Image: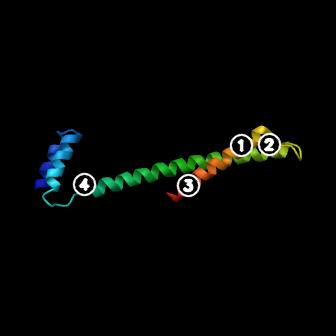
Amino acid sequence: MRGADVSTTVAFFGPEQYRVAFDRWAKDGEPDPVSPAILEQQARTRNSDRQKKMVQDTNKLVSLATDLKEQVEKSGKDTITNDAARKAEEIEKLAKSVRDRMKD
């Protein structure tokens, strides 16, 4: 019953008042029913955001790689333009970023 009192009070409290009320409630030794659900939702949101960013970055990688390939094919045998070198560096940085994000 005590948990219901806290949740009813939360609607009228600001963040600091909620923290104080929750601390009092948690000191009674009852488990925290809200925390696991909140943590799970936050984890899902972070994973979703990370996935969206990885998809954007990999699409950009494909685009940059395609552009670089076309530039290299158009240029002479021993000629590399500054733009091609810049794209190669950008591809390298973006690939590292995607790889690091996949490890997280």
Q: Residue 38, position in %: x, y?
A: 31, 53
Q: CA distance from mark 2 to mark 1?
A: 10 Å
Q: Residue 30, position in %: x, y?
A: 16, 60
Q: Earlier in the sequence, mark 4 or mark 3?
A: 4
Residue 82, image quadrant: top right
Judged from the image, the secondary structure of the residue bearing numbered disc 2 is helix
Q: Residue 102, position in %: x, y?
A: 54, 57
Residue 71 disc label: 2
Say which amino acid is labelled 3.
Asp
Residue 54 disc label: none
Q: Earlier in the sequence, mark 2 or mark 1?
A: 2
Residue sitting at the far right = 77
Label pair 2/1, CB-CB below 8 angstroms: yes
Q: Residue at x 19, y 44 (%)?
A: 18
Report the side of 102 relative to 85 (left or right). left
Q: Residue at x 33, y 55 (%)?
A: 39
Q: CA distance from mark 2 to mark 3?
A: 28 Å
Judged from the image, the secondary structure of the residue bearing numbered disc 4 is loop
Q: Residue at x 15, y 56 (%)?
A: 27
Say which amino acid is labelled 4.
Val
Residue 13, image quadrant: top left
Residue 87 disc label: 1
Q: Earlier in the sequence, mark 2 or mark 3?
A: 2
* Residue that carries the numbered disc 4 in the rendered image: 34
* Residue that carries the numbered disc 3 in the rendered image: 100
Judged from the image, the secondary structure of the residue bearing numbered disc 3 is helix
Q: Is residue 28 above or below residue 16?
A: below
Q: Earlier in the sequence, mark 1 or mark 4?
A: 4
Label pair 2/3, CB-CB below 8 angstroms: no
Say which amino acid is labelled 2.
Gln
